[in-house]
Image: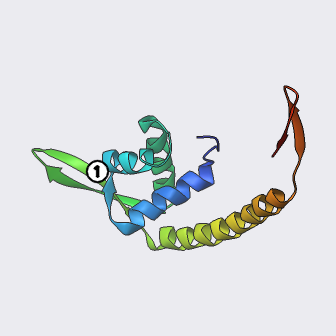
Amino acid sequence: MTYQLTAPLLDACVLGIIAQEDSYGYTLTQRVQGVVDISESTLYPVLRRLQKENLLITYDQPYQGRNRRYYKITDLGRTKLTYYRYEWEDYKQKIDCLLQDTSTVKDKKEDGGKVLEV
């Protein structure tokens, strides 16, 4: 992927997934990896930090003789997610405006003797 996933954006994605339903680490990782290229080890520190900030809580549930640790969003986490969604829409609109405006301006660059419109 061309664009970097920043820490606040990753936090927002994790909170958004968990707001839809409680999730355990593996399924959460699979959902995020289905959209962006990150390693599994990237998410666990994010989950611990969000838990430390009281945005998530955990509980264990038995599954096939083992316990799975599930993450659940807190009221504070929902408030933070609302903030992230607002900020994302604002940011996305501004970037969309820049991208749309630049598409009307044609920069000419030379490439091997041909003039390309970008």
Does 16 sit above or below residue 2?
Answer: below
Q: Position of residue 118 (x, y in %)?
A: 81, 46
Q: Is residue 52 left or right of residue 91?
A: left
Closer to the camera in the image, 56 or 109: 109
Mark 1 lies on residue:
69
At label 1, which amino acid type do we have?
Answer: Arg
Q: Is residue 81 left or right of residue 73?
A: right
Does 109 sit above or below residue 59?
Answer: above
Q: Position of residue 1 (x, y in %)?
A: 58, 40
Work out which residue is located at the far front of the displayed protein and give it: 114
Q: Position of residue 61 (x, y in %)?
A: 20, 55
Q: Kindly indicate the quadrant of the structure image that contains residue 22.
A: bottom left
Disc 1 is placed on an element classified as strand
**Residue at coordinates 56% horizontally, 68% vertically from top-left?**
80
Closer to the camera in the image, 97 or 70: 97
Q: Kindly indicate the quadrant of the structure image that contains residue 65.
A: top left
What sort of colour scheme is used for the picture?
Answer: rainbow
